Structure formats: structure tokens, C-alpha cells
């Protein structure tokens, strides 16, 4: 496993993390979406999938520790690493980063996807699933920055993609980074 890489895509909601993760997936990385744990817990509890219930479940899970998502997803990461490089969509907190850094050391890479709040809020208002109003998006930004130290992993990124222009430009930049990490 020493040569296998774990690449985590970090950024605020609506920056383009899932799109960048897909580029890695199309290039042979196994994609692990940390948020699947939230979705599974919502289903298990019979809750309606919406922003309020997602926040409730995220906060409940993080009550087990701010590295909870990294710990809960570790078996999926280990299983995937047996066969492939891994791309993580949705590492958020500083504690998740330090937990994974402790496990994977120099084989862990962070790729930040950055977009301005106005660009992100416009995207979030028109996306097909998990749509957010500007108010909901701003509230989520505040919660993620203040409560889960989401800025730390973004600041520590090995690579940063500025996603302010076209989708094609973002994909080209993601493919350039994939080629450096393969």
C-alpha cells in the first residue's frame, strides 16, 4: 500500500469538489464521499433528506469527535486502497485531516477547490440536488468555518484550483493535478 495515494478534495459548499472528485474517479481513483455516512444515517433514522436534517445528523455524528467522518470512512478507504488510489470527496475538519495524515502521511494529498462566496451561492441555488438558498449557504459557511475548522485543510492544500471561470477550465486544471499524482 506504500505507493497508493489518498487525495482529498477540500473546499466550501458549491466550490466544485464533486466535479473535481469525478475527474479523479474517471482517471482510476476510487471515490469515497464522506457525506454518504450522513445520507445513510438519515435513511436509518427515517428522516426526510433536507438541509435541517443533514445538519442535525452531521452535528450528531461530530458529537462523537470532530474526526468522526474520517474514522467512520476509514474502513471504506482501506478497502479501496487495496486496489487503487483513493479520492475523498468531503473531508471538512482539521481533525479529519490530522487523523488521515496520521494514517497516510506523505501519501495524503489535499486539493482545494476555491470559488468566491457569490459564485458558490449562485451555483448552490441552481443545483439539482442538495439545493441551498443564499441564506442557507451563508449559514452553512459560518457553521463549517466556526464549528468544524473547515478552513484549516483548505489552507494546507498541496494544490489549489480556482474555480471562478468555466467548468472546462476547472476540469483541465484537475486533470493536470491528476497527472502529477498518478
Image (spheres, rainbow, N blue to C red):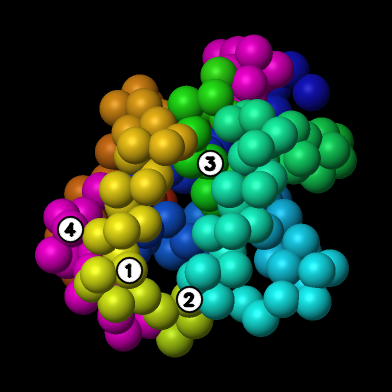
Q: Nearer the viewer, residue 4 or 116?
A: 116
Residue on which the image places disc 3: 91
Residue located 37% across and 47% down the image: 143
Residue on which the image places disc 4: 117
Residue on which the image places disc 2: 130
- Image quarter of the C terminus: top right
Which mark is drawn over residue 136? 1
Residue located 68% across and 45% down the image: 61
Mark 1–mark 3 distance (CA, rounded to whole Å): 20 Å
Mark 4–mark 2 distance (CA, rounded to whole Å): 17 Å
Q: Nearer the viewer, residue 62 or 159?
A: 62
Mark 2–mark 1 distance (CA, rounded to whole Å): 11 Å
Disc 2 is placed on an element classified as loop
Question: Residue 83: where, in percent of width, then height?
Answer: 82, 41
Mark 1 or mark 2, which is nearer the start of the sequence? 2
Q: Which residues are magenta?
A: 99-127
Mark nearer the viewer, 2 or 1: 1
Disc 4 is placed on an element classified as helix
Question: Residue 48: where, in percent of width, then height?
Answer: 66, 81
Which mark is drawn over residue 170? none
Mark 4 or mark 3, which is nearer the start of the sequence? 3
Q: Is residue 57 visible?
A: yes
Question: Residue 113: where, in percent of width, then height?
Answer: 32, 48
Amino acid at each position: 500500500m506504500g505507493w497508493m495515494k489518498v487525495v482529498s478534495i477540500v473546499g466550501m459548499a458549491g466550490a466544485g469538489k464533486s466535479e473535481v472528485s469525478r475527474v479523479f474517479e474517471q482517471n482510476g481513483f476510487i471515490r469515497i464521499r464522506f457525506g454518504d455516512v450522513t445520507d445513510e444515517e438519515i435513511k436509518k433514522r427515517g428522516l426526510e433528506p433536507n438541509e435541517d436534517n443533514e445538519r442535525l445528523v452531521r452535528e450528531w455524528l461530530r458529537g462523537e469527535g470532530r474526526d468522526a467522518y474520517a474514522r467512520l470512512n476509514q474502513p471504506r478507504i482501506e478497502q479501496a486502497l487495496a486496489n487503487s488510489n483513493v479520492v475523498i470527496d468531503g473531508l471538512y475538519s482539521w481533525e479529519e485531516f490530522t487523523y488521515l495524515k496520521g494514517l497516510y502521511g506523505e501519501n495524503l494529498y489535499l486539493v482545494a477547490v476555491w470559488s468566491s462566496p457569490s459564485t458558490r451561492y449562485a451555483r448552490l441555488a441552481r443545483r439539482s440536488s442538495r439545493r441551498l438558498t443564499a441564506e442557507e449557504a451563508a449559514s452553512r459557511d459560518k457553521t463549517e468555518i466556526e464549528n468544524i475548522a473547515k478552513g484549516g485543510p483548505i489552507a494546507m492544500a498541496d494544490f489549489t484550483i480556482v474555480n471562478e471561470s468555466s467548468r472546462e477550465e476547472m476540469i483541465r486544471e484537475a486533470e493536470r493535478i491528476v497527472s502529477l499524482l498518478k
